Image (cartoon, helix red, strand yellow):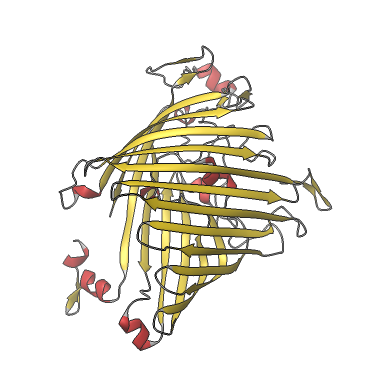
Amino acid sequence: QGLDQIPAGSQTLGQRMNTLHLVLGGYIEGGYTGNIYDYNTSRLHLGSSIFGYNITPSVARALQITNPADQLPRTFGRKFNSEIGNHAELNQVDLSLSRAIDFTSTAFRRRGWDIGGQVEFLYGTDSAYIQSDGLNFYHGANASAATLVHPMYQFALEQAYADVAVPLGNTAALRFRFGQFDSLLGYETINPTTNLFYSHSYLFNYAIPYTNTGVLANLYLNDKLQFWAGVVRGWNVSLRDNNSTESYTGAIDYTPDSRDLISFNAIAGPEDNHDNAHYRTVLDLIISHNFTRRFMVAVNGDYGYDGAGGGYTGPTGVQGIASHWYGVALYGSYLINRYVTFDVRTEWYYDGLRDAVGGPPQTNYYEDTANLIITPMPNSTLGKYLHIRPEIRGDFSTKGHLNTNLTGAHNFNAGVAVTGAVDIYYTF
């Protein structure tokens, strides 16, 4: 509405952008996560201090905590909703300018080419987890349960790519993508508005990369089948790589009808520091089916292997042995009415990669999550873009360590964690 009030020659700026098929959009998301399981008493509890800690000034000084609002602990094993301390956070403010290429457009086939792309910026606490190597101007960006993010709120360039496409025959097309883009792998995404849940699966957090930088070729055969293949710099790498060898990624997307999707994705290449010999490979499979207009199920499975074991000791060799990780997540979603959707997720993840999640290697993790997606004003022109997601989640570990004490040390007797969370997001 605002763009339509700005004059631009004989049109408004909004009208001119529509003519050029340019879309300015984004979203804003904030939330709160509380650990409601007290492992000291092995009881569920709710209270004013939901983490169960009372940080006195002397304790804060001893732990070098200058701002008690930024105190530990975080929720172990979490990213994107690993709230620091006992307060709500502004997770993501997203702004993007994009132009999609419509392969079915008669104008595209008549012209014989088209260009598109996207530039997307992110601000908030989640930005620390998607910073790519070479575009990260902060320190302490890859925060673990035992460290603080400095600063908590960061800017990140999530995507910046250009597309060039040419038609092939009556239905097919070939597209080339250059730049930084979201990974082809994974059922869940960085964008919270395309996910069912506020919290993320272990698969999304640890099994796959978030972004890649390089070149992709996309062969679009028709609205049912397309292929992706490309050369990228590695996992979450942009302008600076930790080795001198490229990685390779690809995907096959098959949509037999409007109800089903089968997607097979992969990435392979050296990812360990100064190591060009040992490859890290991940195979990713996504299958979804809409039984009815209201009821959908999906499954996401990953298998990963790292020939270097994920560790590095110096310029002449790697530490550890070859390791692997794998898991599966099952999703279900039921539209109760236009106001409420009920979702469930159950997941098993085996972490064989040294310190991938942060606990001891060779650990099985399980999590069950249930939530509601509430759209309080579905009939409002502007209010229909507002969504509220309360959720409850239980995590289980075969080797404990799901809770963290004030010094960042894990409690290896705590194999259960129960969290309650809620987030609110608005798209525009």
Q: Give the residue displayed 58% in from the left and 33% down from the top.
A: 365
Q: Quadrant of the C terminus?
A: bottom left
> In the rendered picture of this protein, how many numbered marks are placed on residues?
0
**Where does the image place residue 363, in percent across and percent down from the top left?**
65, 33
Residue 369, picture quadrant? top left
Kindly tell me whether residue 319 is visible in this rendering: yes
- The answer to whether residue 140 is visible is no
Residue closer to the observer: 351 or 134: 351
Give residue 361's position: percent from left, percent from top: 69, 35
Which residue is nearer to you in this view: 375 or 83? 375
Residue 257 is situated, as x and y percent measured from the top left of the image, at 37, 62
Q: Quadrant of residue 376?
A: top left
Furthest residue in direction right, as rendered: 316
* Residue with the most extreme top position: 41
> In the rendered view, does 218 fall on the left or right side of 4?
right
Would you place residue 221 above or below residue 424 in this image? below
Q: Residue at x 83, y 50 (%)?
A: 317
Quarter of the N terminus within the rendering = bottom left
| Frontmost residue, 102 versus 5 | 102
Vertical side of 377 occupied by 75: above or below: above
- Residue ID at (48%, 63%): 253
Residue 175 locus on image (x, y percent)? 47, 75
